[in-house]
Image (cartoon, rainbow, N blue to C red):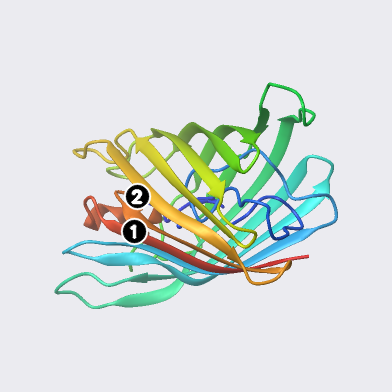
Amino acid sequence: MATRRAGSLLAGLTAALGLTTGGVAFAGPPFITDDPEPVDQGHWEVYAFSDGAIDAHDATGVGPSVEVNYGAAPNLQLHLIANLAYDLPAGAPATFGIGDTELGAKYRLVNPGKDDWYPQVGVFPLVELPSGSARRGLGAGYVDVFLPVWVQKDFGKWTTYGGGGYWINPGPGNRNYWYVGWLLQRQVTDKLALGAEIFHTTPSMVGRDGVTGFNLGGQYDLTDHYHLLFSAGRGGLLYAVDGARVTNPVTYYAAFQWTF
């Protein structure tokens, strides 16, 4: 079971709004559920972050890690996550080292005007490269692929987005599976936005049930270019590097973001 995807695994408690300013709500991380809105052309988002999953048997996750998003063309965002991973199983030696690497490209298919009733629609395929050691519990050991579709609609200070997709999840004991999620968030003050998501994954491992979970989180804008992102929740196996060791874990995401 690979770590949280996106940026995502998405991607995964990051804003995908390009040059973020105070008074603009975040989208995408610090949640697992992502959005269709790419970084503006010629702009960057850079995150230093950690996320993980913790239960009575294990603590597993990534950090310090780096996520980079770049607006390469109109409606097109390129995406990279480079991880250091950790695995702290109860009664066994702790491990720490290079984790899996995530590559992706977000493309917005539908970009409505401000007064149009229909939502934004985009795709954000992700590829997880097995740069981490599966033997040490620091990676999946196989190339995983996520093929999602995301939609988003803004209503004043409220934003809602979600969707889902199909994970191709090879390896002994693994199963391909579906992810669906939805999120609602509000710009509470000029500097603070808060949101909540609910999500479900079908079984990703043989002998395991599907998982329904949630996250609560937000973004605080220190300046127009520097931001803090945070979330916590329950059940998010996509935050676990060694997902076979954890069941219904408590999860966290924390990041410092630079937009320019």
Residue in the foreground of this view, choosing between 112 and 23:
23
Which quadrant of the figure contains the C terminus?
A: bottom right
Q: Residue at x 23, y 65 (%)?
A: 58
Q: Residue at x 72, y 37 (%)?
A: 107
Identity, as a three-letter code, of the amino acid under mark 2: Gly
Note whether 187 is above or below 183 in the view shown: below
Cβ atoms at labels 2 and 1 below 8 Å apart = yes
Name the element at disc 2: loop
Q: Residue at x 17, y 71 (%)?
A: 90
**Is residue 137 visible in the rendered structure shown here?**
no
Q: Report the disc number at residue 251.
A: 1
Residue 125 locus on image (x, y percent): 60, 39
In this rendering, position of residue 230 left or right of residue 59 = right
Give whichever of discs 2 and 1 has the lower sequence position.
Answer: 2
In this rendering, position of residue 203 left or right of residue 148 = left
Note whether 117 is above or below 159 in the view shown: above
Q: Report the disc number at residue 141.
A: none
Identity, as a three-letter code, of the amino acid under mark 1: Thr
Q: Report the disc number at residue 236.
A: 2
In this rendering, position of residue 206 left or right of residue 32 = left
